[in-house]
Each structure stands twice: as structure tokens, then as C-alpha cells.
Image (cartoon, grey):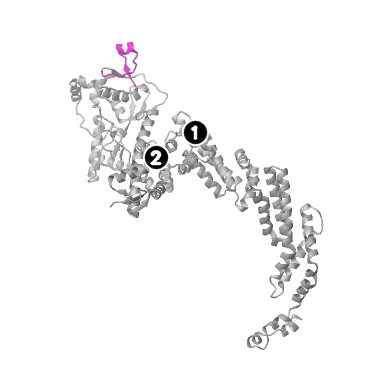
Amino acid sequence: MNTQHVKNLRPSEADMCYGAALPMADQHTMEILEVGLAFWRLYLIDCIKSRLSSCLMREVLNDRLGICGQQNCIQPCLASFLRVGEVRDFERAGMEIYNQIFQNPLIDATRSFYSQWACQRESELGCAQYVTEALALRTEEHNRAMQYYKCSLLSMQNLFQEIIVEQRLNFLNMNVRYVIAEEDKSNLRNLFRLLSPNNLCNELLHCFGEHVRTSILEAISNLPKDSSLTQVHFIESLLNLRSRFLEYIDDVFDGKTAFRNQMDKAFNLAVNGRVPSSSILATTSKQTNYRPSELLCRYMDSLLRKSVKTMTISETETKLTASIAIFKYIDDKDLFQKYYQRMLCKRLVFNYSSILELEESVINQLKTVCGYEFTSKFQRMFNDVQLSPELNRKFTEYLQSKDIRFTFGHHFHVLTQCSWPISLSGVTDFLLPLELYTCTYHFEEFYTAAHQGRKMRWAHSYSTVEIQLLFTDKAYQIQAPAINAAILLFFDHMDSDRIKVKDLHFGLQLAVSEGRSPMCNENSSTSKQNVPATDSSITSKMETCSQGVLDSSCELDLIQRLLTPLIELNIIYVEATERQSNNSLGNIVTMDSVIALNRSFTSKRLKLRVNFGSQGKESNQSEADQVDRQVNEDRRYFIQAAIVRILKARRQIKHAQLIETILQQASNRFQPPIPLIKRCIEGLIDTGYLERNPDDPDQYSYLA
């Protein structure tokens, strides 16, 4: 009928275009289905829509209350409302009927139901139980909507969040701090699931951040007094907490970025000892006196040294990678840079590093975090050490071509002066045995011929010598600084087991170097001085020395400091005189004292090491003071250069804007104190780089 009757009655496109039929004529020829749907709406739905709406609301309520009724009729009835929209030119009619008869009454009924439910549960239940039942209700409502009225699902979800969650937000946030402090994962996850759809987690984020800071401060509040344990306790406590909270965020908060960022912010504040004044932690946290940059650097140094034998390479690499995560939280990255450069120097020069691949891996990770400029010196130091094997191979070939042979092994490092933190100011100059001097002399000839125009200087205070003791029952090997090795070899030179201190002093020509510039070369042998060719010349110097010079207290302190490591190992001892025995002075050295080899020396270990200088608390404190002076000076130069660059680019700038710009530029290196910035500004004004605007003292102008 649609094909034979209705289609023939409809005007063609030509008739519509050329006026053979009116455009409205098409509306009077509907197909059979369209006629049926139109009559369905006109003679059925419109007549019983009020009663139909009441019946539908009753069945929805029965389903919510668990009463069995005619719920199966809901879905077909609503489908008939939507089918009306299939009538041509009445596309919106189906949704209008659906909204009028079902959705609008459903929203009103649901609003009343949710409000009554929330008021009753809020008065009867605690927060945790309320959240649990609210989640159960949300699941039921979702399943009901998916089964009966999918078109109203979004409206029901929005209504649920508005009444059950947003209007009760103060009630839900009431116990957030307690739940987080108890780390009740089940209740906390339920609360997060309830609040997260509408991003209502601000209080949850804030309390979580404070809990992280509190946990960190508690973990690092009581550091061990033993310096060797302090860095281990500090860093591993942070690593354990970070690992725990990362797992906590994944389990409870679905790994949301906002909670990770809050954790990172809390670590940054706690590690650097910066607790906000508005925080409750400001009144409870103690002033921290630890230095996170130094502790982290010493911890990484202990991992990279050969002495770590309890861990595999993969375990060490895992801990080093985790340490880089702690490094990201530290503000004073320039302080870390200074410490790391010094410790890297000791590991590379003194052969303390366990595996060079680990050193390179750490340098690359630091470069990823802070950029090439931060690690440029580290990389050049590492490259210098990598070039050493090839350099020593060529030197060996050079000696073979000259038919020169030595009875000992040797290894040289050529170091770039501007990259290594090596300074010979205040170190001890000394005279080494002729054999070692001869070796360094030939190396200098070889290197000068191979590299024209390069100036090479020796850094013998960083040299090491391995000696085998032949006067003992066992063949002990001792690794010692060159100057300590020279003391032991001096017994061979004198062919005696007993030596007077004054003879040792003049035989080695001990003297403190004053103000010499940093060295660019280091080797395992001697300093470049004219070594006497015969024993008689040394003996004559001893006989003609001035006794007044010998009694210098500075020289006695120097000799005492050099002999102490060997005396502590019991390799040598000071023969007690009658005066020392009466006064119980023990190993106090004078110029008339006699030191002797301990031929009965024994040790459980066949390989012994003499440490470079003092390794105690005083040495660490002295190094810390020296690093602090260098860092403070570098920071002052950095701030002054930043001020000049900013003023040169802008010509004029307000004080507050200048401070903000400097803080932003220095944020990747350190957190500059405001008083330091002000002092730098005043210094540049005094030196004529900038001036205050006469009309506005709060504004600075650049002076060309």
C-alpha cells in the first residue's frame, strides 16, 4: 500500500520545483507506520499520560524498595515514547513525551528519595559507613538506569553527586585527616571513589600532603650521631617512604597525578626543612640541621666505592636510580654538585670506583635531570680517566723503544685542570726516591713530545703507591699516599731499621706548599724536583742542618700528622725515650725521636690501606666548611650576573619583579635567600652597574 498508493499521491521533485504541487502537500501523505504512531500518541498516550506517569514512578519506587511489581513494563513503555519520534517532521516529539511523562517526574521523585536517604544516613551512621552505603546506592542506581531507562542515566548520576556528595561534603571531610593518618586503605579508597567523579578531593589532597610531610619528618627526626650511619639512615628512610607512598597512591587513588604531585611537593618541603607557616607541622617540627645535599652525595659515594661487597651490581644500580629520585627533591643542587665533584675525583683518581659503567650511568641520569651544564665537569673528569689506559699503553711502547725498564709498575692520569677539584695550596711538598722520580721524568719527556704547547704540572699529593713489605713473615701489600710510601722507602734508602725524625725531615725535604695553583696532572709516582743522585749528598744535608729550624712547632705537627697513619697500623713505632716514659707521652714525636720498623708486624689482612689524611669528623667538617665557602661565593656571582642580565635586557624593573625573576632563574640550582639578593643589588649599585630611580626608589635602572 505504501508503494502503490502513498507514493503515487506524493508530488515528485519536479512538481515541487516547478510549482505543479504545493510544498505542504507532502505532509498529507504519511506512510502506514507513521499514521499508526501518530494515532498511538493522539488517542492513547495523550489521554492517559498523567496516570501512566504515576504508574511508572510507582514501579521505579517499588524497584528501589525491593518490592516485586510490574517493573518489566517500564522499559517497553518508555520505548514506545521514543518510537513516536520516528514520525516524519516530529523527530523531537519522542524525547518531549519521554521527558514530560517520565524523566521530569523521575528527577523530582529521585531528588526527594535521595534527600530523605541522605538525611537519615547522615544522622544514623558514621562517615565510613555512610560512604560505603552511598557507593552501594550509586551502584544500584546505575544498574537500574542501565536496565530500565538508559536515557536518564546521566541525569541520575548528576543528581546523586549533587545531593549525596556535594551537599554532604563537610560531613564527608570531617574525618578525612583521621582516616589518612590511620592509613585505612579500604575506607580511604571508598571515600576517593565517592569524591573523584566531581573532583571534590581538595581536602583529601591537602590532608594527604600533610600526612606525607609528617611521616618524613618523623623518619628523619632522630639521625644517628655516627657520621657513617647518618647518610644511610637519612636516604634509605626517604626511599622506603617514597616507595611506600607510591604503592599507596596506586592502590588507593588509582595512581592519580594530582596525588603524586602532592607527594612530591611534600617531599620537597620536608627534605629541605621548609614547612609552611600555615601548616600544623610548623608548630611541631624541629629546626633541621642536616644537609640533604651532602648526605645524599655521601650515600651515593658509599654505593659507588669498591668497599660495597654485600650487594650485586643490579642492586647497586637500583639504589642509585632511586637516589636520583631523592635528588630531584633537593633545592641546593649546586651544593650537591660541589660534593659530588670532590667525591668523584677521589673515586676516579684513587681507583675507589667499583665499576666505571655505574659512574657513567649516574652522570647520565644527573644530566637528564639538570642538563648538560650541570654535569659537564663530571663528564670531562670521566673522559680523562677513560683515556688513561691508551695513554699508558703508548708510554709503555715509548719506554720499550728507548730500552728503559723499571722494576715496578706505573700508571699515570693526565687531568684537565679546569675540571678537577685539585688544589696544591697548603699540601706537603716532599722528595721522593730516585726510581720514582726517574719514571716521572721519562713520562714528562714522552708527554711533552706528543702534545706540543701543553703545560703539565704534577699533583703528587693525590698519588698512590703500592708497597710490599719484605721484612715480615708474610708478604703484606700496603696501598699508601706517595708521601707515606716515601717515609717507608726512606728506611730502604738509609739501610736501617731506625731513623731519627730530624734525618727523615731533611732527607725528604718536607715543606708546606703556599698558594700554588691547581694541578692538571696526577700520577702514581713522584713530584718533579731535583733528586740527589747519591746517598752522601743527603747525609751531608742532615749534618749541616740548623737545629733552630728543626724545633719549629709547625714542622713537628706536620711530621706527627704524616707518621700517625703508619703508627696506627703498627708498621712503625716511636722508640720511647726516658723523658717520654716519665711523662707518659707515648707516641708524641720530637725532632730527637727515633722511629723504627716493626719487624714483628702482623695483621689478619694481607692487603692494607693507608688513608689520605684524616678520615674523621674533623676532616669532614673542614671539607664542609670549604665547600660552603665556594658555594656561597658561586651563588653571589650567579645572582649578580643574573641581575645584570635582567637589567641589561629590560633597562628598568621594579624591585618585586626583579626578586621574582631571580628566584625563577635560580630555582634549578638553589633557593636564594632574599637578604642575599638584596646585598647583591646594593653591591651592584655601589659598583655602578645599576641605580635607583630618583622618582621611584622601588625601581632600578641599568647603567650602560
On the question of residue 145 being in view, the answer is: yes
**Residue 572 among those drawn in magenta:** yes
- Give the residue type at disc 2: Leu
Instruction: Tell me, for residue 357, which label it has, or none.
Output: none
- Give the residue type at disc 1: Lys
Q: Residues within 10 Å of mark 1 (few under 14, many from 20)?
A: few
**Residue 78 among those drawn in magenta:** no
Is residue 478 toward the left or the right of residue 299 in the image? left
Secondary structure found at label 1? loop
x, y (%) of residue 62? Answer: 79, 55
Is residue 278 toward the left or the right of residue 665 in the image? right
Residue on which disc 2 sits: 335
Q: Residues within 10 Å of mark 2 (few under 14, many from 20)?
A: many
Q: Residue furthest right?
A: 69
595 in relation to 625, above or below: above
Q: Which residues are magenta?
A: 569-591
x, y (%) of residue 49? Answer: 78, 66
Q: Comparing marks 1 and 2, which lies closer to the viewer?
A: 1
581 in relation to 561, above or below: above
Q: Nearer the viewer, residue 540 or 494?
A: 540
Residue on which disc 1 sits: 286
